[in-house]
């Protein structure tokens, strides 16, 4: 038996620099893993079998329905395992127990992290001896964020997600993740359909934050965070603006989208600050909250 942790992520920056000939967009993003995690265990088996368990997911989460009736071939863990089998010509299979705690379609990268954990775990279970760079190459066939999760920690991501560069870690931070009650279908595709040249930036915001982390250790980074999708949410989703205004009215400023949302996060070096923010939000709304920390 082997086991792997699959951590969620936040995007400290997410810039879009233009559309590619293949239909994807080029991005620059400073990503960071956090200790909200899924957990996978792997056992040898003649065929591939996913056994999902759902822990502390919001009642509205669509993942249990997506995985219903034992039809799991669209689950990214299954896709990752099948892709790895094809890539290596491995003939047997595995039972993969997937314990889910990261909410799905929330911008936290849960599915991509699970896929990366599956590649790492099966690489060990099947004794394939692939390098991280080879696993990242396989992961890109599964999803654009999967290669990042092969490495985790603090990384700059560029291209469509395939270019990953480890950078100096940020100082430890507390993160309050707030799951806003949006119901998106084909969320990422829909959001990118709204992107135009006004949303493009050069990557300098990401580079400047990296420089600040490298030169100063970067204890306070709230004013340096950026997400291109925030302007799109503000333009097309009135409910998003209402929630951000509510948070501001109770003294919680500098709340940012996690990836393509709809989760948002509040970051602080002070645990008490994050706990106070969580209490303030709990007093005005019944939202799913996660108190987390950055992890290497």
Image (cartoon, helix red, strand yellow):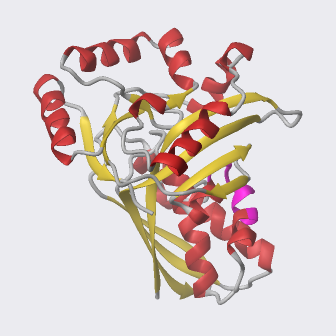
* 194 or 65: nearer the viewer: 194
* 276 or 196: nearer the viewer: 276
The spot of residue 177 in percent (x, y) is 33, 40
Q: Is residue 28 left or right of residue 276?
A: right
Q: Is residue 4 left or right of residue 181?
A: right
Would residue 38 be seen by someone viewing this image from the given angle? yes
* 270 or 52: nearer the viewer: 270
Q: Residue at x 68, y 29 (%)?
A: 16
Q: Residue at x 60, y 65 (%)?
A: 150
Q: Residue at x 72, y 28 (%)?
A: 202
Q: Residue furthest right?
A: 21
Q: Residue furthest front?
A: 215
- Residue 140 included in the magenta stretch of the image: yes
The spot of residue 82 in percent (x, y) is 69, 68
Q: Is residue 88 left or right of residue 38?
A: right
Give the quarter of the figure containing the C terminus.
bottom left
Q: Is residue 13 left or right of residue 219?
A: right
- Magenta span: 137-145
- Residue 168 included in the magenta stretch of the image: no
Q: Residue 90, located in which quarter of the rendered image?
A: bottom right
Would residue 71 be seen by someone viewing this image from the given angle? no
Q: How many marks?
A: 0
The spot of residue 210 in percent (x, y) is 57, 45
Above or below, comparing residue 275 to residue 287 in the picture: below
Q: Residue 255, located in which quarter of the rendered image?
A: top left
Q: Residue at x 69, y 37 (%)?
A: 27
Above or below, comparing residue 92 to residue 180 in the picture: below
The spot of residue 14 in percent (x, y) is 58, 35
């Amino acid at each position: 038996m082997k086991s792997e942790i699959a951590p969620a992520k936040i995007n400290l920056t997410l810039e879009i620099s233009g559309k590619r000939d293949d239909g994807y967009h080029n991005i620059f993003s400073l990503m960071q893993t956090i200790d909200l995690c899924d957990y996978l265990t792997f056992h040898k088996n003649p065929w591939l079998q996913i056994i999902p368990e759902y822990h502390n997911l919001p009642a509205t989460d669509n993942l249990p329905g997506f995985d219903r009736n034992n039809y799991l071939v669209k689950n990214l863990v299954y896709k990752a395992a099948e892709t790895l089998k094809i890539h290596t010509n491995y003939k047997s299979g595995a039972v993969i127990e997937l314990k889910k705690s990261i909410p799905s379609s929330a911008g936290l990268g849960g599915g991509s992290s699970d896929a990366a954990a599956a590649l790492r775990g099966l690489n060990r279970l099947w004794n394939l001896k692939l390098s991280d760079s080879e696993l990242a190459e396989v992961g890109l066939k599964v999803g654009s964020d999967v290669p990042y999760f092969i490495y985790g920690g603090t990384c700059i991501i560029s291209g469509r997600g395939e270019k990953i560069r480890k950078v100096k870690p940020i100082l430890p931070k507390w993160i309050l993740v707030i799951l806003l009650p949006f119901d998106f279908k084909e969320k990422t595709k829909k959001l990118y359909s709204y992107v135009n040249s006004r949303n493009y930036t050069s990557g300098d915001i990401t580079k400047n934050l990296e420089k600040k982390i490298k030169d100063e250790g970067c204890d306070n980074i709230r004013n340096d965070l950026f997400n291109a999708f925030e302007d799109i949410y503000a333009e097309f989703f009135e409910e998003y603006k209402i929630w951000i205004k509510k948070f501001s009215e109770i003294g919680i400023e500098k709340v940012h989208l996690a990836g393509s949302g709809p989760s948002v996060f509040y970051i602080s070096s002070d645990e008490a600050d994050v706990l106070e923010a969580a209490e303030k939000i709990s007093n005005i709304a019944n939202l799913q909250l996660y108190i987390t920390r950055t992890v290497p």
